[in-house]
Image (spheres, coloured by chain):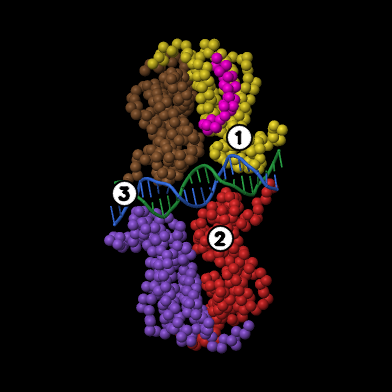
Chain colours: A brown, B yellow, C red, D purple, E blue, F green
Amino acid sequence: MARPKSEAKRNAILEASVRVFAKEGLRAPTSSISGAAGVAEGTLFRYFPTKDALVNAVYQDIKADIAGAVFSSFPRKAGVRTRLRHIWNRYVDWGAAHPAAHRVVSEIELWGGLTSESRALDAGNLAELQALAQSFREQGLAAKDLSDEYIGSVINALEEMTVSLVIDDPDGAERYRDLGFQVLWNGITARPRLRDLVSE
Amino acid sequence: MARPKSEAKRNAILEASVRVFAKEGLRAPTSSISGAAGVAEGTLFRYFPTKDALVNAVYQDIKADIAGAVFSSFPRKAGVRTRLRHIWNRYVDWGAAHPAAHRVVSEIELWGGLTSESRALDAGNLAELQALAQSFREQGLAAKDLSDEYIGSVINALEEMTVSLVIDDPDGAERYRDLGFQVLWNGITARPRLRDLVSE
Amino acid sequence: MARPKSEAKRNAILEASVRVFAKEGLRAPTSSISGAAGVAEGTLFRYFPTKDALVNAVYQDIKADIAGAVFSSFPRKAGVRTRLRHIWNRYVDWGAAHPAAHRVVSEIELWGGLTSESRALDAGNLAELQALAQSFREQGLAAKDLSDEYIGSVINALEEMTVSLVIDDPDGAERYRDLGFQVLWNGITARPRLRDLVSE
Amino acid sequence: MARPKSEAKRNAILEASVRVFAKEGLRAPTSSISGAAGVAEGTLFRYFPTKDALVNAVYQDIKADIAGAVFSSFPRKAGVRTRLRHIWNRYVDWGAAHPAAHRVVSEIELWGGLTSESRALDAGNLAELQALAQSFREQGLAAKDLSDEYIGSVINALEEMTVSLVIDDPDGAERYRDLGFQVLWNGITARPRLRDLVSE
DNA sequence: AATGAATGAGGATTCATTCAT
DNA sequence: GATGAATGAATCCTCATTCAT
């Protein structure tokens, strides 16, 4: 090879994309991104054939980052509550630490140009979430009528809410994180005689 | 005249905007909108001086519509739960009935071009919500540590989640509506004796 | 209508295209053309949706012009030779008078982007030519074995040759025109008694 | 060294150029050509300093190939008709065998970037042709008023016509070749008592 | 000598907005 | 007031060419 296609440059473009998209939205020109990445306009297109492909790559990159953050040292053997709390904390912390990426993911999801491959990436995370939801239900902790999928939605909705609150008010981070988990737990666990069941 | 001539034409443009923006995103050309509205390209700009102004007007129009749907015949004298349930049902039903508008509002909120005037519009709705949260707390129903604002966020997050679920699966509408409210209620009301256990 | 889409402007663009394409080839930028036509860059695309469409329109426009020149006051009742001579003269004269257009048509034909609609336009002219060839043959004038189609090809080939010669050397126009016709006539008419000599 | 290393590579590029130019036109990117030739993008420019130079080289290469095909074992001592027939057959056969190269030459000739050196190459062939025309005329075979140059043009025009017909309809190859020659011969040779017949 | 990554000027096309009718 | 033709800046992407490896 004359010069290998630098991984560093690819990452520079992805990171610049996050920064620029966060500030200007997905309608930011590719030239802003190449500029922010310190490469020529044409170079961007050697790494990503179209702007759409770039956006998809940004999405996949962030999703992989989230998955790494959330599932690294995941206490797979621990009790349901501990595992859920792990995911919760990790995701909220990730969001707090990466507000730009968080914002960009939201915009991309609304965007309408995601490839099915990109969408498939979520399946992994989701599967893990639903596995958790399943053992949650099997232990009789779940309020009746809640499906695995539904529980996943609730977790997700309250995670997103919490991340937004934390980003808007970083000083309240820990409080929001705890409150959110409490609301989540109370929201989805069965109420009557809970104390017997919740011994963990 | 301050107002341009035809209110009907203005509404046609607003409605076309919702349809077109829902399908193509905010990056849809103004010419698509004027076309969909059955007016000439130039006419649009007699009603809205710029595209940004149009987007803001769309936002305000939808928000006003939501407010009308949610607060019309609001049982101001009824109990907290009834009032909350009223808001909950009305909002979810509105979302189910207006998926396009719902989607467009989400995109506009992420968009970054909302004027402060537009943002202020929400204040009204929010005020009502927080009034509700306040009496909710005053009656000792709320889990401790939940501020009015925070309760508003939770309501909002679970509303959005529920609307999305209903739009994706209209047949489950009523079930999602009820489940969502149950999760909300359990999530934010105090759990008499469980506090001890939940301390982590 | 606010302002009708000016036919004059459309023609200005077509004529500028011929001039510019003749000088710079089909790879000339559209901006050169709009500039030469005295309109804005964007205006060109209101009249022709793509560059390809423009090239096709140029082709059709020129072909129509040729057909007009060649078949106006066509002596349909006259003898074969007169009619052939009419076409011959008119075409050669047209080419001499429109060297740029002549050149551009050649390049477009080699280009590979002609629509079937554009190609169909030639059918008209060709039909007329072949009708002529047919009556030519029916009168026993044609050398044996020459099909209508083939005769058409010969006419065309010698016409093109003649036009090129005339363009390169305008002073010899009349001579080339006469010589060419003589070669054509001798080439395609039967030679009563010469067959013996020509046996190879 | 003056010559770059691999003659094989140079030829691979030239042949790939013909293939690619025939399919995509001269506007084909150099990267398509290097790809088709199995060399790196940069390698092409070690053999040909610019794209224009490559096109000129392609032209010269094809022209040399034609000259080889047409004038190898040329019966220099034979009669005019035999010699003309030799050239005719060889050229038509070459065209039939190399439709891509034939097409590419046409496009290059229209292209406008040929160097004078490239144009000069034809001179050789042309000289031979005109020598033929000269002895043709000297033997009193030519119709009066036909210059050597003019006769060359006619030969060329009918050759091109014939090659095109053969490429479009390979089954008719031999027939087109013979017919074409007959038209050519009749077209340019004197007709004994033509004036009687041609009374117009 | 060969490679292919990097470059950036250039080109087709879009679209918000203006303005003549 | 309504229209839609006209505008040209802005954008995505291409590609001939250079140059580090």
Mark 1 burial class by Cα count in 10 Å: few <14, some 14-19, many 20+: some
Q: Which mark is residue C19?
A: 2
Q: Amino acid at mark 2?
A: Arg
Q: Is residue B35 above or below residue B133?
A: below
Q: Secondary structure at mark 1?
A: helix
Between label 1 and label 2, give the one nearer the viewer: 2
Image position, residue A166 (x, y; %): 45, 23
A97 is within the stretch colored magenta: no
In this rendered view, identify the residue nearer to me: D58 or B200: D58
Marks 1 and 2 sit apart, C-alpha to C-alpha, by 44 Å
Q: Chain of mark 3?
A: A
Marks 3 and 2 sit apart, C-alpha to C-alpha, by 45 Å
Q: Which residue is mark 1?
A: B54
Mark 3 burial class by Cα count in 10 Å: few <14, some 14-19, many 20+: few
In this rendered view, identify the residue nearer to me: D16 or C181: C181
Q: Which mark is residue B94?
A: none
B109 is within the stretch colored magenta: yes
The residue sitting at 58% across, 72% down in the picture is C92
